[in-house]
Image (spheres, rainbow, N blue to C red):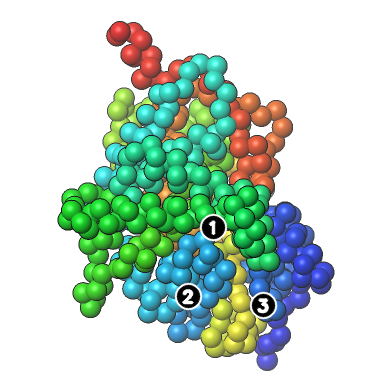
Amino acid sequence: MMPTVLPPGPRTPRPVQQLQWIADPFGYLDRAAARFGHCFSTKIAAGGNVPFVMCSDPSAIQEIFALGPDRSLSGRINAFLSDFFGDNSILLLDGAPHKRARKLLMPPFHGERMRAYGNLICQIARDVYSQLNAGDRVIARQLMQTITLRVIIRAVFGLSDERAETELLQWLDINRSPAGAAIVFLRFLRQDLGAWSPWGQFVRRRERTRSMLQVEIDARRQHGDFSGDDILTMLLQARDEEGMPLDDVEIVDELLTLLVAGHETTATALAWACYWVHRDPSVRTQLLDELKALGPDPDPSAIARAPYLSAVCNEALRIYPVVPIAVPRILTQAATIGDREYPNGSILVPCIYLAHRNPDLYPDPERFCPERFLDRQYGPGEFLPFGGGSRRCIGYALALTEMKLVLAMLMLHVNFELAEPEPVLPSRRGVTLAPATGVRMTVLSPTSDRAVAAVTS
């Protein structure tokens, strides 16, 4: 007879566990796993009294990912994000509405569109890197945020003016600030006490951002301009199986979701990749040799297929995942996961961080070792930086391609030196975990583009 009670977990009061989760999520998970193993209950939920059951066993994770919409819900657990993205965000939807939204959003992230984005990503990265000079001190995460924001603005929104970049950046800054991290998880802080209060600033900035996007939508509808190859254009033209389009509120909600999910996470992953590549000279040398062997002006698709580059990016996503957990599943009927039967209403959470630190899968898990991903292929319950199942990140292919191309352009066009005397550790930035210092680097030589320009001028 299988046990039907939830597994044991930390017994400290809920507010204490929530504060530990906000302040030091990796430490909280490490301590709980060391005591309770691959499966344990936690009290970190922003609302409600049902514990989260953290699972890091690969087979259990696969079983959770296999739960269909008839057996579990996920959008409901993200209801606390409606203030950030809107009620129509794909993150908040379940059942038929989620299936419809996912089907409408999928086409821009696959096929021919990905190849077009590749050229755009490389051009944006080269443009940003060309502004660097020898001796410049840069913060890798800020540099990558500049690139990924411009990719979002061009590829997703189809905008190119500096005003849009400034507006969106200000909204993102509020989301990823320490106050932003607190208001995500602690709802009682969501009090509008005026324009200078944290929540008051957020609300006013959010409305300005939504208004800016609505003005762009109105202009395109008014002029019938659907000639662009950006994601906004495709969403304006998208039709579901009944021939119905997305309305303007739905489009704005999805755009804000793509902005935060596609900008912050990719920039953070790139900052970690920069850190690890420049921390280990042998990794840097091997990666640079592979990229140079592709020729003086390699095609983006050839870069994206480079094996060692792919392994480096995967290892960066493994060792410090940008988000520590995948989307939770709320059971709508009893289910057997592993050796335990969970009752209806249980909340099961695949733990990305702990799965990626499993020493049986990743020997010496705290060591950065890209060769892991050359020696074997990991299953969906073993390597899951983008989640899995029907809730897998819809833009994962674009994010991974962007990560590879931006890192490759960096290696080929800039000679950097790591300016971090001590190991860099993760710290919370809103809902993501990022390098605490941002990764400080020094430019040793100008980009190759600048060097060529100087010689020929």
The one nearer the camera, 186 or 293, is: 186
The label nearer to you, 3 versus 1, is 1
Q: CA distance from mark 2 to mark 3?
A: 25 Å
**Which amino acid, by three-letter code, is at mark 3?**
Gly
Q: Are marks 3 and 1 in contact (CB under 8 Å)?
A: no
Tag 3 residue: 48
Tag 2 residue: 66
- Horizontal placement of 87 versus 103: left or right? right
- Horizontal placement of 283 versus 168: left or right? right
Report the residue at 65% width, 37% height from top.
437
Q: Secondary structure at mark 2?
A: loop
The residue carrying pointer 3 sits among few (fewer than 14), some (14 to 19) or many (20 or more) residues within 10 Å by Cα, namely few
The one nearer the camera, 241 or 372, is: 241
The residue carrying pointer 1 sits among few (fewer than 14), some (14 to 19) or many (20 or more) residues within 10 Å by Cα, namely many
Is tag 2's residue or tag 3's residue first in the polypeptide sequence? 3
Is tag 3's residue or tag 1's residue first in the polypeptide sequence? 3
Work out whether residue 290 can be spotted: no
Q: CA distance from mark 1 to mark 2?
A: 37 Å
Q: CA distance from mark 3 to mark 1?
A: 25 Å
Q: Secondary structure at mark 3?
A: loop
The one nearer the camera, 50 or 324, is: 50
Is tag 1's residue or tag 2's residue first in the polypeptide sequence? 2
